[in-house]
Amino acid sequence: MTTTEQAVAAPGSAAGGDAAANLWLHFSRMGAYRDTPPPVIVRGEGAAIYDDRGRRYLDGLAGLFVVQAGHGRRVLAEAAAKQAGELAYFPLWSYAHPAAIELSQRLAAAAPGDLNRVFFTTGGGEAVETAWKAAKQYFKLTGKPMKTKVISRAVAYHGTTQGALSITGLPALKEVFEPLVPGTFRVPNTNYYRAPVFGDDPKAFGRWAADQIEQQILFEGPDSVAAVFLEPVQNAGGCFPPPPGYFDRVREICDRYDVLLVSDEVICAFGRLGTTFACDKFGYVPDMITCAKGMTSGYSPIGAMIASDRVMEPFLQGATTFAHGYTFGGHPVSSAVALANLDLVEEEGLDAHVLEAEGAFRSTLERLLDLPIVGDVRGDGFFYGIELVKDKATKETFDAAESERLLRGFLSGALFDAGLYCRADDRGDPVVQLAPPLICGQAEFDEMEQILRSVLTEAWTRL
């Protein structure tokens, strides 16, 4: 397993054995299932999932940062069934349908500034791909055809399609698929725990990290850079929040050099941080937003790229066409489910709940800082990473072999066996990531902390 694979090993089942014969699992060592079948999850209810043996697990990752409203919400299933009975499918290729129209209006109303035009996809990677292609064509249409390059951050994940993977800052994830799309460049991320400079001053560190984007633009040449892709809170590496003033400075830099700022909110949008769009929480207005995952709470696949009026304007002229699209982008059923999900989030006040409970979530996880293996607890909203270290005083991390034994040899399976589904990963330094459904409260926070404490304590004794 490479360092980019998620550690999710767990005991299998008879049904899992049948599945392994034909099912090609994502980001998984398929050889691991020759003799041990994969777990089979058959049901979800609230913040819990159940396997085919009837065992309950707390869903500490909301599936994959997706199930905002929790499992088993019948109103979302009913919305899908109702729409399928009326219009199960029609493409958005020169035609429209009511669900996509209404959803685009809903998203535009929620987006900041003048981000009023919604291009639907079926997922997050496709939304990132769409944003890069739109940026390239935008500059060709506005007389700057050499502006094609993209800047993103080290260790950042932006998707698996060829373009999105090129923007991704994880070399081990990319190497087997090279050559990829040229013209992408990396700058430092906002991992304050391992800040190379200004480790005692978050604001100064944020200014330094943002200034590295300016330096990269100047090095490549402002006339060649089209866009900067940034997550509000970076996922890979373990939930890096932006330091104070970081996005203000990035916005200033992008404006100075006529570079589009893309806020990649595939994970962070739709309440994960307590706001519909995370850029609002950090006070910046991007030129494009990419989003997916929580838009439907995972009950049906959909994604979107939301563009500003400025970006859209040249595409409205004459016979200009954005020659790009997806068969299932803005699918009627997915659009209807998204509308029902947004209604549910609003009716139950889930955004407000996250803002009210995020402090309790953080403080509950910070109890784990008394363990010798826990170096840092970081994140925002209901989106947190726990970095594991060999030495708290020096912040010494684990080497590749040690990380393999720790994460895949023990932690992932042990956490699952103890009743917690989450992510143990080492894209960057070893971390455990938690992003529970937005319906969770102190009872679930305590359950996560207790399971983590027990398993991490045992992990330390095995080192």
Image: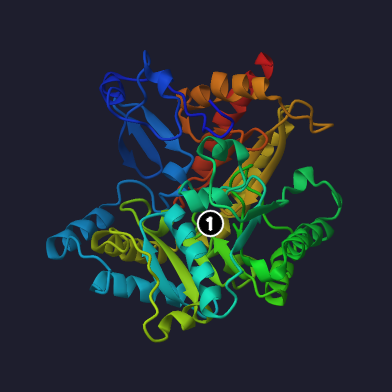
Residue 52 relative to residue 359: left or right = left
Q: Which of 94 and 367 lies nearest the eye of the viewer?
A: 94
Instruction: Inspect this view and state whether residue 395 appears.
Output: yes
What scheme was used to colour the molecule? rainbow
Q: Residue at x 45, y 25 (%)?
A: 29
Q: Amino acid at mark 1?
A: Cys
Residue 230: x and y, percent? 61, 59
Q: Is residue 433 above or below residue 214?
A: above
Task: Bin the neighbour count of mark 1 within 10 Å (Cα to Cα): few under 14, some 14-19, many 20 and up.
Answer: many
Quadrant of residue 255 in the image?
A: bottom right
Q: Which of 415 and 140 lies nearest the eye of the viewer?
A: 140
The total number of labels drawn is: 1
Residue 134 relative to residue 462: left or right = left
Q: Residue at x 73, y 71 (%)?
A: 253
Q: Is residue 366 above or below residue 209?
A: above
Residue 139: x and y, percent? 56, 74
Residue picked out by circle 1? 268
